[in-house]
Amino acid sequence: MGRNTRKRRTPLATKVVAGAAALAVGGGGLVWANFYASAHEENPGHNRTRSAGAEIATIQCPDVGQNLRDVPKGARAGVDQELAKLDKQITEAYARLASTRRDQAGDAGFVQNAILGPLKSKRTAALDRIGINIRRVGGSAPDGLDQFAECKGMVADQPDGGDDGNGQDGQDGQDNGDQNNGDQDNGQDQGQDNGQNQGDNGNGAAGPFADDFVDINDVQPNSRDLENGLAANGEGGSTGSFTTNCGVNENNLFNSDNLIVAPGVDNGAHHTHDYVGNQDNDAFSSDEDLAGAETSCQNQGDKSTYYWPVLRLQDGTQEFDAGDLGGGAEGNVGKILKAAQAEIKFVGNKRSDVVAMPKFLRIITGDAKAFTNGVANANSSFSCTGFEDRQVTDKYVLCPEGSQVVRTSNFQSCWDGQNIDSANHRDHVAFVQQDGSCPNGFQAIPQLQVRLVYDVPTPTVENGQVQNPYAVDGFPEQLHKPITDHNDFINVMDDDLMNEVVDCINSGEDCQ
């Protein structure tokens, strides 16, 4: 497989991170330190019990970007650069966390003194620079930025569910169920430190684990409210749809950038994305680049970019990015699985007509950091063909023979009428309210729905172990949790096509 390398750069700082992150490579790729022990673990040949509470599984830091609201446009480029540095600092700290287990075992204060303390100092400096960037253009830096400097160690348990633990703060009506996975009693630690861990899927303790999987037959039908994912059919609603066929990334366009969250930053995503639609999408692409690019969509008027973290089978395959940042050097290992189908559809609003999306509108749905942030913005789900009335956000699914894995993302469909983006990349769009209407000050736009279908060999889960699991790529400290799945979109339809989309939806037609 190839990857997009246009305008990509490898600054010295990136090379330094690579040296820090590439702890050991063996088997299926990166081998993180073997630390994810459960409270009642019994390992063949070792017969020992270890305390999960004594070991820090990962690092939880406040998500600064989600808390920035009023950043002047003139400061956003500098602020985005600093936010990317914060992510890089966490990656470096996580790499150190994973490589110093023996030191931690002999010193109860090691994590705080040698990892979290220095991380806080670096974050404080970055937060200070964020304030400087904002004040430099005449803005007012948010009060109390320094409160976001301190990070903490997390044990294996799932974090608290954000504001209310229900997944969307009532915005999209979904019920994510119990997000607490408990002690993750999965016996993943084989007690070996020689880089040849058994059952670690080639990435040491970076996950996923047996507790991250559920048999689709054990998921209750309609347990996740999908009302907002369906075409509108209420009185006064817009009931049509528009389907765009953009392929399944036949051109092998991959990179670990994120043009929305970290423009101008190489490896800003810290995980690899699949791209369909626009063929000129990397961190350094301008709106003009996007508008002038080729597209994989059959309708050449759709140059939008649709992208999502790749799905991998952790089977030991050495992919093209096995030694790269965003790939194996950050725990994203194994065979990249392309979707067998990528269904991209725009639907209407239950209560009203929709208006045209502005060109270059950016929308992110889901949260790549939901494991450490909490689940307030989690919004993607897993299911199986033939069982799609059963959707789950916090587990990967085990499908029966003949059934395929399905990833579904239904985007925010209300727009503030003014902005194509916002400082935290969320405030300019919103989910519909429980009655299907948009919040005050927002208007309905076509809702993007992305349904990805994969041929995935069903992992084997026995005795708390999972063999050949699949997982979405993610930030290394997110431990490949399914709750971190997400999807990204930049609208680059020409005006004629966007008007056609709106007309089809508002007239009740199904077009493509």
Image: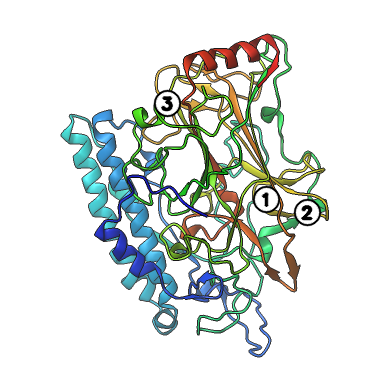
User: Circle 2 is placed at which residue position?
Assistant: 399
Residue 178: mark: 1
Q: How many marks?
A: 3
In the image: residue 451, left or right of residue 144: right
Q: In this rendering, does residue 143 appear at all?
A: no
Residue 403: mark: none
Quadrant of the image occupied by residue 237: top right
> Of callouts 1 and 3, which one flags the residue occurring earlier in the amino acid sequence?
1
Q: Amino acid at mark 3?
A: Phe
Residue drawn where x is 30% and y is 63% of the image: 15
Seen in the picture, residue 157 relative to 492 is either above or below; the reply is below
Give percent across and percent down for residue 230. Answer: 71, 27
State how far apart marks 1 and 3 are (Cα): 36 Å
User: Helix, strand, or loop for circle 1?
Assistant: loop
Residue density around tag 3, few if under 14, some if 14–19, many if 20 or more, within 10 Å: many
Seen in the picture, residue 196 relative to 274 is either above or below; the reply is below
Residue drawn where x is 26% and y is 48% of the image: 127
Nearer the observer, disc 1 or disc 2? 2
Seen in the picture, residue 207 relative to 235 is either above or below; the reply is below
Q: Amino acid at mark 1?
A: Asp
Q: Amino acid at mark 2?
A: Cys
> Of callouts 1 and 2, which one flags the residue occurring earlier in the amino acid sequence?
1
Give percent across and percent down for residue 137. Answer: 18, 31
Quadrant of the image occupied by residue 502: top right
Residue drawn where x is 62% and y is 75% of the image: 39
Seen in the picture, residue 39 relative to 499 is either above or below; the reply is below
User: Helix, strand, or loop for circle 2?
Assistant: loop
Residue drawn where x is 65% and y is 22% of the image: 512
Nearer the observer, disc 1 or disc 3? 3
State how far apart marks 3 and 2 are (Cα): 37 Å
User: Circle 3 is placed at which residue position?
Assistant: 360
